[in-house]
Image (cartoon, rainbow, N blue to C red):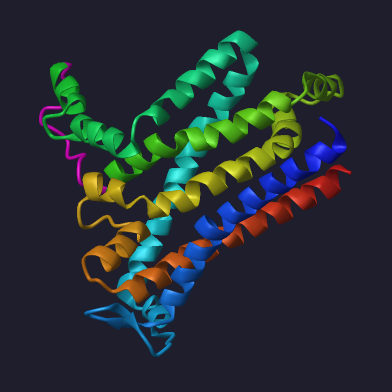
Amino acid sequence: MTKGARQPFRTAVLILVWGWLLMLVLAPNLLVVGTSVLSRDPAEFIRLPFTLDNYIRLMDPLYLDVFLHSLYMAAVTTICCLIIGYPFAWALSRVSKRRQTLLVFLLIVPFWTNSLVRTYALKLLLATNGLINNALLAIGVIDEPLTLLYTELAVIIGLVYLLLPFMILPLYSVFDDLRDELLLASHDLGAGRWSTFVHVVVPLTLPGVLAGVLLVLLPAMGMFYVADVLGGSRNLLVGNVIKNQFLDARDWPFGAAASVLLTVAMAVLLFAHRLSRRRLGEEGG
């Protein structure tokens, strides 16, 4: 294909991409932002005048407690995913390429099933008469069933189960690019395994850690159906507040304000991630 023939194709691709971004990304977000500064109307959902009361309501102790508790559960989920995913990604990067392909495929396979369906399957495992309790009773570890379902622990287990691959994949990417020569050079210079891990492995894999945290922390706060199915009414996430405002209370402006808050939090994390990568690049240079 000649240069002249490629130009119209490139232009068409750019128009398609930018059109998709404008119509399906920018426009919906602008509508949410606009709705967040309007007033509630019982009949039409939204109306004038413009107001900032919806954002002020977010500071109400009731909603603030939900946000803080949601952030706590998301942070615990992120830490659990990191603790499990870091050694898993390291081990995954150490096996042969053929086995890596198989293991990555097995890691991605759960995505072929809807996450809501998998959450209900997890509910069957955690129930009072579920597989976990029955197994523990059968081997004599416990005398009576454990209360696992409709607890904070159940929500965290569900979030870790659903979001763990999002932590493993970016970590696996950086581990796969980690050259063995750097580890050998560290050992040759007298560093032990722990010193090599702290001073060589961790700094070089930090971009993957930050990417994994970014992919787990904010989505964990918005997965309302996990809290609905596994947590009950006392273990709400920010996503539950947003969903309830739109579907139950019909308070679209307040639900939009909560959505904007999550979007701003994501933007802050993205900026922090970009800033940290730039700083790491300058230190590496």
- Work out which residue is located at the far bottom of the displayed protein and give it: 49
**Left or right of 8: which side holds 246?**
left
Residue at the (74%, 26%) spot, across then down: 178
Q: What stretch is highlighted in magenta?
A: 139-151
Magenta run includes residue 141: yes
**Closer-to-camera residue (180/261):** 261
Residue at the (21%, 26%) spot, across then down: 132
Classify residue 139 by image quadrant: top left
Q: Considering only vertical position in the picture, is 170 above or below 92? A: below
Q: Where is residue 100 in the image (x, y as percent from the top left)?
A: 58, 15
**Closer-to-camera residue (83/21):** 21
**Left or right of 243: which side holds 56?**
right
The majority secondary structure of the magenta stretch comes to loop
Q: Quadrant of the N terminus?
A: top right
Residue at the (47%, 26%) spot, across then down: 108
**Closer-to-camera residue (261/247):** 247
